[in-house]
Amino acid sequence: MTSRSRAIATNGNRDSVVFSDGNIYLQAVDGVHSLTSDGEKRWYVSMHGGPQNTNQRTAHPVIADGLVYAPTASITEDIERPNAKEGLYAIDDSTEEVAWKYISPVDYHGWTYPPAYVDGVVYLSVMEYGIVALDGKTGDIVWQTELKVDGPPTIADGRVYASTEINDDKAGDIVALDATTGNELWRANGRGTGFTTAKTLEISSP
């Protein structure tokens, strides 16, 4: 193991290791690290943020079409909204340059979850705000839907599925959105007392 990879192992909170096209990607509090499968450094991009300083491991990157999409819970200081706490970096895997950044409109503490990528569109859950669909190449917003999401999105059969926060009545939702428009299709809700408690779900339409 190289000296650089040993440094990563002691550098604060880290998320899951991601393997793609023979290379390794790891997100830590200082940024995104890419190594070869033999442990040699490829590149490093500072993000001034990463996985939360909690037991939540929510920030691993997604690699698609030559870009590394890395969510962050702490935005760099060179942006117009210095109090923003959530966002997404798109990093060119061959040049290690930041192709674009998405900055969420929220000004309070939270995090963005690992994105999903399908057919050139990046889907991102922003805690306490909602789900945003972004053009994978440009970062332009395709649509955004306000939801109190509490987990990463899942894409299947033209739909975006996400869970919401549990409210004061210990009830939370699973919501299905149209992947093209962001319109809500249905939601299932029920009660539970913890992460391991099963819910009785009722399907409702908007």
Image: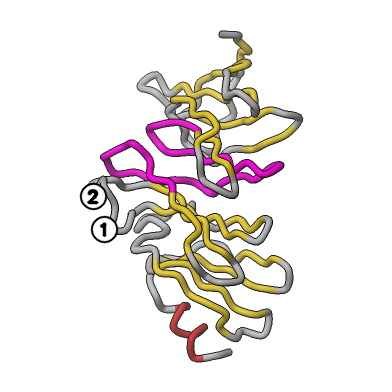
Between 114 and 10, the residue placed more toward the observer is: 114
Mark 1 crowd level (few <14, some 14–19, many ≥20, 10 Å Cα): few
**Residue at the spot of label 2:** 82
**Residues marked 2 and 1 touching at CB (< 8 Å):** yes
Residue 122, percent from left and from top = 59, 43
Secondary element at tag 1: loop
**Is residue 126 found inside the magenta-colored segment of the image?**
yes
Residue 25 colored in magenta in the image: no
Q: Which residues are magenta?
A: 102-131
The quadrant of the picture occupied by the C terminus is top right
Residue at 47% x, 55% y is 89
Label 2, label 1: how far apart the Cα atoms are: 6 Å
Instruction: Please tell me which residue lies in front, 135 or 4.
Output: 135
- Residue 145, given in percent of the width and then of the height, sits at 48, 25
Q: Amino acid at mark 2?
A: Pro
> 193 or 75, which is in the foreground?
75
Tag 2's secondary structure? Answer: loop
Amino acid, disc 1: Glu
State the quadrant of the N terminus: bottom right
- Asked whether residue 57 is in view, the answer is no
Q: Using the image as rendered, state which of residue 22 and residue 11 is in the foreground.
A: 22
From the viewer's perspective, is residue 40 above or below residue 117?
below
Query: For residue 76, what is the image quadrant?
Result: bottom left
Q: Sequence-wise, which precedes: disc 2 or disc 1?
A: 1
Determine the image quadrant of residue 78: bottom left
Residue position marked by numbered label 1 in the rendering: 77
Give residue 17's position: percent from left, percent from top.
59, 66
Q: Residue at x 38, y 70 (%)?
A: 12
Q: Is residue 206 left or right of residue 8?
A: right
Please indicate whether residue 147 sits to the left or right of residue 34 in the image: left
Asked if 32 appears above or below 152 in the picture, the reply is: below
